[in-house]
Image (tube, rainbow, N blue to C red):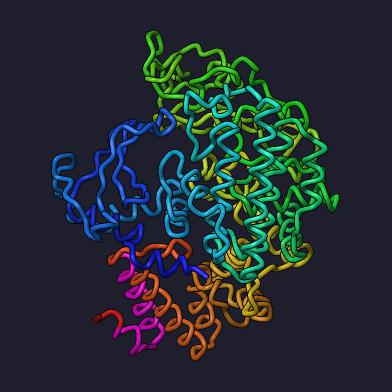
Amino acid sequence: MLSSHFIYAQQPSYADVIRTFSQTYQSLDEYENYTRFSKKKKGWYVQQVNATQGDRLLSEQLFFSFAENRYLDLDSTYEKTTDPDVDAQVARFLQEDGSSLNWYNFDRIPYYGYNGWYLDVIRDYGNRNDLNDTLHEALGRAYSGLAASYLWYQFGGMFPEYDTLHRKLAPLEYPSAQRFDSILKAFDNTRIQFEKMRQANPAYLSIVGNSDIKLFNEYLYQYNQLRICGYDSLAARCIRQAPLPGPYLLQAKNYLNSCAPNAILFTYGDNDTYQLWYAQEVAGFRKDVTVINYSQLGLSPYVDMLKRKQGVRMTVPASFLEETGNDYTYYKDAAGVYDSYRNMPVKDFIKLIYNKRYLYDTEDPGSAPSFPYRQVAFNIPVAWNNGKEPAKTESMVLYLEKDYYLSNDIFIFDIIANNISKRPVYFTSRSEMLFEDNLVQTGLAYKLIAQEAVSDLPKNTEIRILEKFIQEKYVPVLSDDRGFVCFDGDSWFFTLFYTLFEHYLEKKDMPRFRYWFVKYDSICPKLSPAQMWMGKYMYRYYIEAGNNKKGLAMAEDAAEWLTAVYNRPEALSGFYSKEAYMDELTSMKEYLGSKKLSSKKISRLLKQ
């Protein structure tokens, strides 16, 4: 069997290429045009693309030649770098704006990072019988990219003028029957490859988990596309065929049980969305909760489906969904607007955008909507009232500080404005959220409230709710040493207990801290390798609980894990700059010192 890892070992990795480029050259990042990388048959390329025009290619140059096995000169295009902080440039490419998925794909797929990459992968690998698990995944992702190219170009597509089946669809245009046949064929081939990946290696680890969850997620991706296209019977059959292992169903129930009755829950990824849809549609569990995926809100047909099929009240007109150029709403000064800090009601704000009262000219056909209120504050009726109806309304002020917002954000404003008085609203993440200051954790979700969550009253309420949730509703779903992996379950498990630990340590309430620590230790007495990225700080809590021996051993394990990640950065474990790595080790050493403890191993790693 051909070993893809052997082949890839002959090539510099994505991280290697970025580091080499950043040590020598300055990227050309402007407002719309930016630098990115691609991996083709001949080698690694550096590209300039236009972000507002579907990543239209402006220029590209070969940077590392596979044939010559060396880096080539780019002096004619890129200036020499004057920035000594190479790590910051590497981190920007590897970690910012969801680029960890790109990193993962570069590591696992032979060709990637340019329009039509999936066609090259299918052409070179589609008829081969000597593929290993990694190449089956690569081929599965290629067929999935092919299917998407017949849809609304969400990723990786291209539109050759001579191919009518790949003509770019209008925002609210649905695929023809002929196109749909091509979609189904690509879907079938995608599932076949992920099935072969699972057969070749059941323990194969992908960016979403092991091979079981990767195969399941593909079924649910297809389910969602089928129902968006209006093929409800095919969608229903697809979701019922999806193979979801039992523990993941328990995790889905944890999410849904974090919400009050009749809630709206905004989700962000695959694992906090697909399993929930399955629990509702197949298991019939908590169908009162409407699960809305944030990424999908950027797709007009998905928004149209929400309005038509899922009973979500929205005021966005069909004309706004049909028009091109509405993906972004920009800030722009406007004549006659003198108070840019006006406290505008949210319904008036979204009406202003939908009517395109103020326009922003772009290079794309048509004009984008704009808003003339810099850091504008507007009111959202929302209350912390235990979900009773009708909700008491209070004023919540949100400042619009960015230069532009995605249509996804505007549609969230719309949904909140038209549903919050009768339906509580939740999010599965508060990180970098629009409403970060007004989200209170209720389990595996965060409820939107009027008060700032940093105040004492919501914080104390949050702790009481979390304790009740863990005691009465929560079922831990954790990775283990036997091959079961649940990144999502691990992340939430540690998040829940970290929140309680930190609260009671800050309050110096040691009896309550020890009470919850004992519960934690009875569930997860040791960390599996997959849990290190979230569990690396547990050593502190063991020491706080008085178990210095175990705490010190865990600190040294965490230091070794950090060192391995620093020396060999991979998409699944992440990237640590030298500064971040040293800061982590220094923090460990200083904490241990504050407890009259020391580690020769950590001191040695710091000196190295």
Q: Is residue 591 a member of the stretch shown in magenta?
A: yes
Q: Classify residue 555 as left or right of residue 227.
A: left
Looking at the image, which is closer to me, 385 or 561?
561
Tell me what residue is drawn at x 72 percent, y 62 percent.
Answer: 248
Residue 338, compared with residue 556, is above or below; it is: above
Q: Is residue 496 visible?
A: no
Q: In this view, does 504 lie to the left or right of 236?
A: left
Q: Residue furthest right?
A: 284
Nearer to me, 290 or 5? 5
Q: Where is residue 237 in the image (x, y as percent from the top left)?
A: 81, 45
The spot of residue 588 in percent (x, y) is: 38, 77
Read off the magenta span: 580-604
Residue farthest top in this picture: 336
Reply yes or no: does residue 292 show up in magenta. no
- Residue 17 x %, y %: 29, 56
Please state, as top left, top right, bottom left or bottom right, where the C terminus lies in the image: bottom left
At x 57%, y 31%, the residue is: 152
- Name the main secondary structure of what is drawn in magenta: helix
Q: Position of residue 370 (x, y in %)?
A: 45, 19
Q: How many marks?
A: 0
Above or below for 69 versus 121: below
Residue 80 visible in the shown view: yes
